[in-house]
Image (cartoon, rainbow, N blue to C red):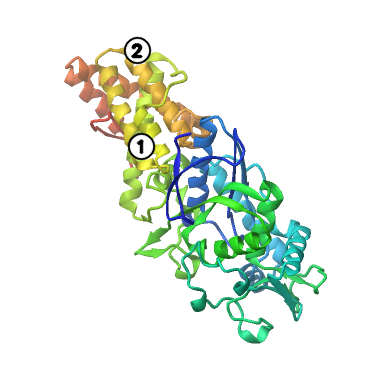
Amino acid sequence: MSLRLFDTATKKQRDFVPVRAGAASIYYCGATVQGKPHIGHVRSGLNYDVLRRWLEHQGLAVTMVRNVTDIDDKILVKAAGAGRPWWDWGAEFEREFQAAYEALGCLPPTIEPRATGHITQMVELMQRLIDGGHAYASQGSVYFDVKSLPEYGTLSGQRVDQVEQGEPDNTGKRDPRDFAMWKAAKPGEPTWPTPWGDGRPGWHLECSAMAGMYLGREFDIHGGGIDLIFPHHENELAQSHAAGDPFARFWLHNAWVTMGGEKMSKSLGNTLSIDAMLRRVRGAELRYYLVGPHYRSNIEFSDVALQESVTAYRRIESFVHRVRERLGTPGPGVLCAEFTAALDDDLSTPSALAAIHGTVREGNAALDAGDHAAASGAAASVRAMTGVLGLDPLDPRWIVGAGNDAATVALTALVEDLLAQRQDARASKDFAAADEVRDRLTAAGVSVEDSPDGPTWSLKDG
């Protein structure tokens, strides 16, 4: 393979060579089901969905694990504040996250394990660490001994002498740098039995245990947002290495979605929920907006940028529909070299989209010139490339999802047919006929925008 990925652990791009030939294994941190998902939450899922699709396109059998953190301090606090059982609260928002991933075209994970379903594996891992001198029990809790692992801090670049994490010193920790793998029972909280006392798991322990359960002692890629590098991923790595497991070969981290330069978060009140966003734009358009920037670059949210993405996606969509209406559904196509090189270069989606838009321009020119073979070939190539990104305009989920009813599908077909007639009139220099078509569309409430890539349309407000 020619794929190169930026590895957070080594701070450089490396050739991707899977642990097992013909297969790839990915674990990434999914939802902590404390509340409604917003676009900052789902960006990670979209980025790793593109990675998975690219690996599968290259013939690898991908095992994708996306966990659910269903027990957590914030879940307990919010559920208690609402007067609801913690499991009831978490289940509601787990369903909302799953609906959000599906609405944005994410392929379902191979497995989506819940933390509370893997207590046995967590107990086994803690026992291995205690036996090896890397963990200790104290006052019903179990802590990882950070000083016992000289390599601690290598993933995040943290200096051990400057680390302090978790609860205050009076909780039974030997050192303020140690972190809790298991938290002793507290009144009113859910608990599970262990040899060291009843309690509940710590966040870091959950992911180490679940990754090992489904992907084995060594796997290919561990992903998540950059905010997870420390302490979460550093502590996962510490637990697993101390237990003797090689763990992940690559660590990938996506950047934030920001508003006003700050990470999108519920605590700042600067969130945009998925259901609210999908009342403004279609699922494919929101997906385009979130996968278009490089996964390691921040997305500073703005309405202008969102609408630019909507317009850009509709240019692609309009071209494919023009070809379908005039020449029939484009068949399987090939990826252009620029697209392949872009994704092989650490998933450079901006360059990949530039390659797609270049092909759209060529295809529109061929269609207007009457070169039907070239136009069909370009549309087939566009479908192949957008398919890798989960954005194929003829994917049934996006055709139906345009308005989620037969009327919208019919409207799209009629408008695209009229636009094709207008393009034919303009190519024949019959500008009066072209203007008449545009006037008919305008009177019907359809706004048409011309661009070098071809016309796009939208329903006018009001």
> Measured from the top left, where is residue 195 in percent x and y?
83, 70
Q: Inspect this view and state whether residue 459 appears.
A: no
**Label 1 neighbour load within 10 Å: few <14, some 14-19, many 20+:** many
Q: For the point 28% across and 18% down, which residue is it?
A: 366
Q: Nearer the viewer, residue 252 or 1?
A: 1
Identity of the residue drawn at 46% across and 18% down: 331
| Relative to 232, 294 lies left or right | left
Q: Earlier in the sequence, mark 1 or mark 2?
A: 1
Of 204 and 87, nearer the camera is 204
- Residue under the point 49% across and 41% down: 16
Residue beneath disc 2: 373
Q: CA distance from mark 1 to mark 2?
A: 23 Å
Q: Kindly indicate whether the residue at mark 2 contacts the one at mark 1 (C-beta within 8 angstroms).
A: no
Placement of 7 over or under 349, stated as above or below: below
- The secondary element bearing badge 1 is classed as helix
Secondary structure of the residue carrying tag 2 is: helix
- In the displayed structure, 294 sits above or below 233; it is above
Amino acid found under the numbered disc labelled 2:
Ala
Quadrant location, the C terminus = top left
> Residue 190, located in which quarter of the rendered image?
bottom right
Q: Is residue 400 visible?
A: yes
Establish if 336 lies above or below 354.
above
68 vs 412, nearest the viewer: 68
**Three-letter amino acid code of the residue under disc 1:** Leu
Q: Which residue is mark 1?
A: 353
Q: Is residue 245 above or below residue 48?
A: below
Coordinates of residue 305 in the picture (x, y in percent): 32, 49
The percent coordinates of residue 343 (x first, y second) are 41, 38
Please state which of residues 426 and 260 is positioned toward the viewer in this rendering. Answer: 260
Measured as percent of width and height from the top left, residue 287 is found at 45, 43
